[in-house]
Image (tube, rainbow, N blue to C red):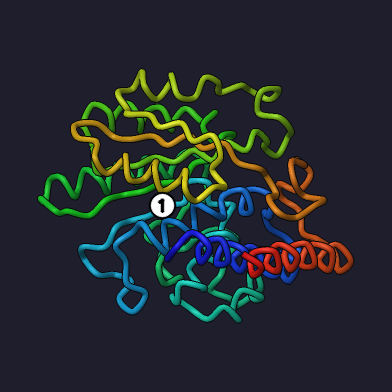
């Protein structure tokens, strides 16, 4: 996909996020929207995957460590062809396979169940070590929240990954600056994030705008060249990106829009889509 196609797909994925969370009357739109470009880039450009064969042995693996942003992952998976886009409206409904957090047993394309913050990166490090021990070529990607990295287990996993020189592991931190209780600096500052990962023997790539596909491409291309150490991509993003009343608003970390807010959000995204069509 070229950049414009990726931007259009990201816009469709955002519409899926808002539609799913509105239908569920619950969920986490803010951090799903901030990470939409990385979901789009991973599933439509970066990873070796096949929606027709979700369990193929040599596929690249993705672990959503910040599992509450499942609406973003589900929308990306649906638009990539793992399951029908129409099923997004069943999010969190009784009997639906689309639970509030990713479930590897029931959702095609989900490589690891997640949701307990801090644990996903440990699972990803285990997958990366498994590939090394088995001489497999697949790569492992995991997405963490900047609030999530306040969890101690994240740094245990980082110590392990650095010690084991897991150069097939890419850790992505969605640095949107906000968590459920407000600004991450006020709650329990994780800064400087880059220096912490460097201390655990990671190659660190700082991305000034993690909602920009050119910058994401450069970061992921660089990560693939790194040998002898894992990579951490620290990307600055906008929480609630492209929805006017959600942008940079911690209140939309874990809240669903009502009918009126849903209409405004979808109109915002329609405008973004129209602007892209003019390009």
Q: Nearer the viewer, residue 263 or 62?
A: 263
Tell me residue 54's x, y (percent).
33, 71
Q: Quadrant of the C terminus?
A: bottom right
For the point 39% across and 25% down, which residue is it?
197
For the point 62% across and 38% down, which residue is it?
176
Would residue 19 appear left or right of 221 to someone viewing this image?
Answer: right
Tell me residue 103's x, y (percent).
47, 63
Q: Nearer the viewer, residue 138 or 220?
A: 220
Q: Quadrant of the N terminus?
A: bottom left
Residue 48 vertical position relative to residue 66 in the rendered view, above or below:
below
Would residue 4 appear left or right of 62 to someone viewing this image?
Answer: right
Q: Badge 1: few (under 14), some or many (20 or more) residues near its Cα, within 10 Å?
A: many
Q: Nearer the viewer, residue 203 or 98?
A: 203
* Res 185 quadrant in image: top right
* Res 108 quadrant in image: bottom left
Secondary structure under tag 1 reads strand
Q: Residue furthest right?
A: 260
Residue 22 vertical position relative to residue 128 in the rendered view, above or below:
below
Residue 2 vertical position relative to residue 208 in the rendered view, above or below:
below
Tell me residue 149's x, y (percent).
51, 32
For the point 86% across and 69% down, which residue is it?
259
Residue 10 vertical position relative to residue 68 in the rendered view, above or below:
below
* Res 164 quadrant in image: top left
Tell me residue 224's x, y (percent).
27, 44
Would residue 168 appear left or right of 73 to someone viewing this image?
Answer: left
Tell how many labels: 1
Label 1, on which residue? Answer: 63
């Amino acid at each position: 996909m070229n950049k414009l196609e990726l931007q259009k797909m990201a816009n469709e994925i955002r519409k899926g996020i808002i539609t799913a969370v509105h239908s569920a009357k619950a969920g986490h739109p803010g951090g799903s929207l901030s990470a939409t470009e990385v979901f789009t880039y991973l599933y439509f450009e970066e990873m070796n995957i096949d929606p027709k064969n979700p369990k193929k042995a040599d596929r690249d693996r993705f672990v959503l460590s910040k599992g509450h942003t499942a609406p973003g992952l589900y929308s990306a998976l649906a638009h990539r062809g793992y399951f029908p886009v129409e099923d997004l409206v069943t999010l969190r409904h009784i009997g639906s396979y689309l639970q509030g957090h990713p479930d590897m047993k029931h959702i095609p394309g989900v490589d690891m169940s997640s949701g307990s913050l801090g644990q996903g990166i440990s699972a990803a490090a285990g997958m990366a070590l498994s590939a090394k021990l088995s001489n497999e070529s697949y790569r492992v990607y995991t997405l963490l929240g900047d609030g999530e990295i306040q969890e101690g287990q994240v740094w245990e996993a980082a110590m392990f990954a650095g010690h084991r020189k897991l150069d097939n592991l890419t850790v992505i931190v969605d640095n949107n600056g906000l968590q459920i209780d407000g600004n991450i600096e006020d709650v329990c500052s994780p800064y400087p994030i880059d220096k912490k990962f460097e201390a655990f023997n990671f190659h660190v790539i700082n991305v000034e705008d993690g909602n920009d596909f050119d910058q994401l491409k450069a970061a992921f291309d660089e990560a693939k060249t790194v040998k002898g150490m894992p990579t951490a991509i620290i990307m600055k993003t906008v929480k609630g990106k492209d929805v006017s009343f959600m942008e940079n608003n911690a209140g939309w970390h874990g809240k669903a829009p009502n009918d009126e807010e849903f209409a405004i959000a979808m109109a915002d995204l329609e405008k973004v889509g129209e602007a892209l069509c003019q390009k």
